[in-house]
Amino acid sequence: MEANTMIPGFSIASEWIKNIFSRTIRSSNCVPKHVGFVMDGNRRYARKNDIEIKEGHEAGFLSMSQVLELCYEAGVNTATVFAFSIENFKRSPSEVDHLMRLAREKIRQIAEHGELAERYGVRVKVIGDLTRLPKSVYEDVIETTEMTKNNTRATLNICFPYTSREEMLHSIRTLVEGDIKSDDINEASLEKNLYTGGDPPLELLVRTSGVTRLSDFLLWQVSQKGVVIELFDCLWPEFGPLRMAWVLLKFAFRKSFSDKEHQLEDDDGPLESQDDALNKKTL
């Protein structure tokens, strides 16, 4: 147990601060509607702290729960988390089996006992190439997601197993196999048939562990104009709600400033900056 959690009233105080922060961010109307997370670093966290890999994943799940709780409290509509890549099937059979069991357990925990589904009305969706899952895992995942299908307040997309290239291939196959004319196959129709097709556009992507690549995650979505990418050197279990609060504050400030700039634009385009105006006067 961390030392600060032993301070009398610490939990109550931290909950109060979280609620105040969340209400403030939510009232700003500058909250990202869709946030993506590459939760990287659980295994390195385990090695760093000389604990079992399983314990590292447990710590990562706790961090995810706390971060998502803050996001939904602040007004985020959709969160998409990268839980298992198709490439992870190349790991040892024992590790893949462990990750499958852990994912089944945690997905069910979110739906059955977690506050995310109950308190925030979160619909849990598992997206990706589900045909690659063992039959027992697939059946359990479908049964679990059915529990929250009627929740409408927010959405949690769990990418398991997933790669962005497979997602785009899936969208193209869906279009080609459907009753659609070639002229109707365009960016809009392709985007509509992505796994995230019915969700708000991605606005913010967070990645941990000091890695500066997207790792085949939401490549189509992140390429849209205005998406903010935040990279952190810390490992995912170390990320936590405090860093997420800072990310949301920066996003709100940036969005608020951007909105004010748009309001200053006239019919002919953006107004001149002070430097441009000064340069003209000196010519």
Image: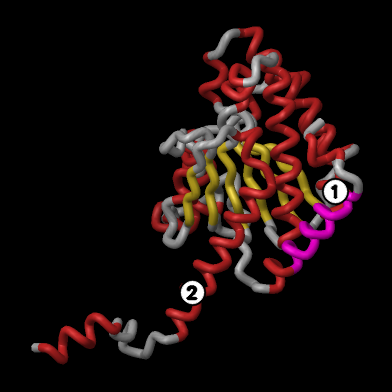
230, 79: nearer the viewer: 230
Q: Residue at x 64, y 20 (%)?
A: 49
Question: Can residue 176 be seen from the camera position used here?
Answer: no
Of the two numbered discs 2 and 1 on the same chain, state the one appearing first in sequence. 1
Element at badge 1? helix
137, 20: nearer the viewer: 20
Q: Residues within 10 Å of mark 2 (few under 14, many from 20)?
A: few
| Residue 183: percent from left, percent from top | 39, 57
Bounds of the magenta span? 9-23
Q: Could you say which disc has been placed on residue 10 in the image?
A: 1
Task: Tell me how far mark 2 sits from mark 1, CA to CA.
Answer: 35 Å
| Residue 268: percent from left, percent from top | 31, 88
| Residue 275: percent from left, percent from top | 24, 80
Element at badge 2? helix
Amino acid marked by disc 2: Phe
Amino acid marked by disc 1: Phe
Residue of label 2: 257
Furthest-left residue in this view: 283
Q: Residue at x 91, y 46 (%)?
A: 8
